[in-house]
Amino acid sequence: MSGLMILDTPSLYYRAFYGVPESVTAPDGMPVNAVRGLVDMIATLVREHSPDRLAACMDADWRPAFRVEAIPSYKAHRVAADGGEETPDTLAPQVPVIERVLDAAGIVRVEAAGYEADDVIGTLTAGSSGRADIVTGDRDLFQLVDDARPVRVLYTVRGIKNIQPVDEAVIAGKYGIPGRSYADFAVLRGDPSDGLPGVPGVGEKTAATLISRFGSLAALLEAAEAGDGLTAGQRSKLTAAADYLAVAPAVVRVACDVPLPRLDLTLPAEPRDPLTLRALGEQYGLDGPLKRLAQALSWKD
């Protein structure tokens, strides 16, 4: 099935890092489990889903200022002593290697200053014609699912070889909300893993019930203000969280208007820099994964 495949690259290399043993090392002893795992993931995805375009989205800014200004707790628990993101010591040195491998292979890396990979993914999705598949282990991107376009998420929670395709029906079945209402639902529920408090006293079931009943967060807040269709307790909780609800949607919702250059995302018919790719394979012990990637991309020997 042809179309655009968009990789949430940080999500995937974290999954590779924790899924492949650290005993997988380069000849010099450096762990390369995340690198090898990611390259094999991409080969498997290309082979099994046959996209004709591919984008590897990256975090230029994992904690953008516009989100932190709105909600200071946003990802605050992940900030390291140096102000950067807490990253496992053996993963951090692998990220530049991943970038060099992708570049040498000709797989387009896409990022934008001041934005997360999610925002780049949203923008590519918004500008895409035809099918778009987003590969991620992050539920936040369920908000981009849209059967009409069509856009779906290939959810990696069960592993890259047992991917769960997520469309509007899956979201409705799992959360009991309209298929395109995930962002509104997430605002109410909150997400401790991202430092988003949600509305105190409104858990997942109540959030789902309210969004399903009113159709959108905007309609729910209008009803709360008018006193229509809500219990006194529900109205009180929403009123008490007014400051949070005024800013949270801009934090939770993925930006779909990131300034990006014109990009040719066509699958590479050959490596962009074969000599560098071969050297990286030798230096980091990546010959096997790179061979499998070459086969998946139908590169000639």
Image: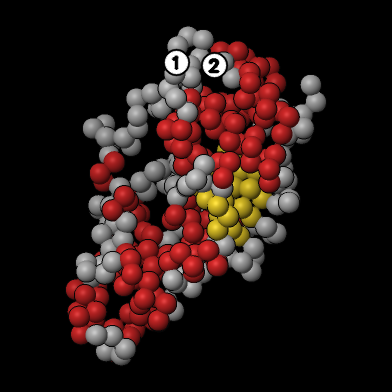
Callout 2–callout 1 Cβ contact below 8 Å: yes
| Residue that appears at 33% across and 86% down | 223
The x and y percentages for residue 151 are 61, 60
| Residue that appears at 60% across and 13% down | 282
- Badge 2 is on which residue? 284
The x and y percentages for residue 189 are 32, 64
Is residue 170 visible to us here?
Answer: yes
**Quarter of the figure with residue 182:** bottom left
| Residue that appears at 65% across and 24% down | 290
The x and y percentages for residue 214 are 40, 81
Q: CA distance from mark 2 to mark 1?
A: 8 Å
Q: In the image, what residue type sits under mark 1?
A: Met
Image color mode: secondary structure
- Mark 1 neighbour class, 10 Å CA radius: few under 14, some 14 to 19, many 20 or more: some
Pick the front one: 34 or 262: 34
Nearer-N-terminus badge (2/1):
1
Q: Looking at the image, how many numbered discs can be counted on the residues?
A: 2
Left or right: residue 44 versus residue 284 is right
Pick the front one: 82 or 154: 154
Q: In the image, what residue type sits under mark 2?
A: Tyr
Is residue 225 visible to us here?
Answer: no
Label 2 element class: helix
Left or right: residue 18 versus residue 51 is left
Figure quadrant of the C terminus:
top right
The x and y percentages for residue 75 are 30, 47
* Residue that extends furthest to the top in the rendered view of this protein: 28
**Quarter of the figure with residue 242:** bottom left
Above/below status of 173 relative to 99? below
- Badge 1 is on which residue? 30
